[in-house]
Amino acid sequence: LIKKIASYAQRKNGSTTPKRFGPTPSSKILFALRPESLIPWDGAMRKEFKQKYRISTYKQFLIKVIEEIKELKISCHKNGFRFEDVPVMLNKSYATIPKLIDEYHWITITKNCKPPDNETLEIWLKWSS
């Protein structure tokens, strides 16, 4: 997709120049086509994954996401519930697992909103009981 021309931009001198899909729109198109298996990414995610995991391509990113999904499956099994039930447990029954992972990345990386640590969660649980 990155090599495909999305449109043409008109220059001041009257000539046109091709505008191509970049990595973010390309990944979003792929996600729209295959929401059960692919996940979009954006500039902030690319930067974070490059710094943290030396990931620089969409393919490498997808491999990392597959690892995250495997870890989630193990965690579900250890905690006594089915992996397939995760969307319902999060009150997002309409969402795919890749979409939930995308939302997690978008909130924690793109929007820089880190989840609370265990100690904070325990305090919140005490408040709610």
Image (tube, rainbow, N blue to C red):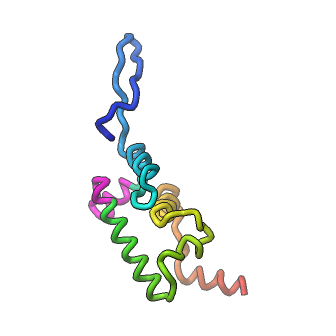
Residue 47 is covered by the magenta coloring = yes
Taking the image as shown, residue 49 lies to the left or right of residue 72, namely left
Q: Quadrant of residue 69?
A: bottom left
Q: Is residue 44 visible?
A: no
Tell me what residue is drawn at x 37 percent, y 37 percent. Answer: 21
Tell me what residue is drawn at x 42 percent, y 43 percent. Answer: 25
Q: Quadrant of residue 127?
A: bottom right
Q: Is residue 68 visible?
A: yes
Q: Percent from the top left, x then y, of residue 92?
A: 60, 66
Quarter that holds the C terminus: bottom right
Q: How many marks overall? A: 0
Depth order, front residue of 43/35: 35
Residue 114 is covered by the magenta coloring = no
Tell me what residue is drawn at x 36 percent, y 18 percent. Answer: 16
The magenta-colored residue range is: 46-61
Depth order, front residue of 102/127: 102
Taking the image as shown, residue 24 lies to the left or right of residue 104, namely left
Look at the picture and state if 28 lies above or below 53.
above
Look at the picture and state if 27 lies above or below 98.
above
Taking the image as shown, residue 95 lies to the left or right of residue 30, namely right
Look at the picture and state if 113 lies above or below 58.
below
Tell me what residue is drawn at x 42 percent, y 78 percent. Answer: 73
Q: Main secondary structure of the magenta part?
A: helix
Quarter that holds the N terminus: top left
Q: Percent from the top left, x then y, of residue 126?
A: 68, 87
Depth order, front residue of 107/65: 65
Depth order, front residue of 110/81: 81
Q: Percent from the top left, x then y, of residue 26?
A: 38, 44
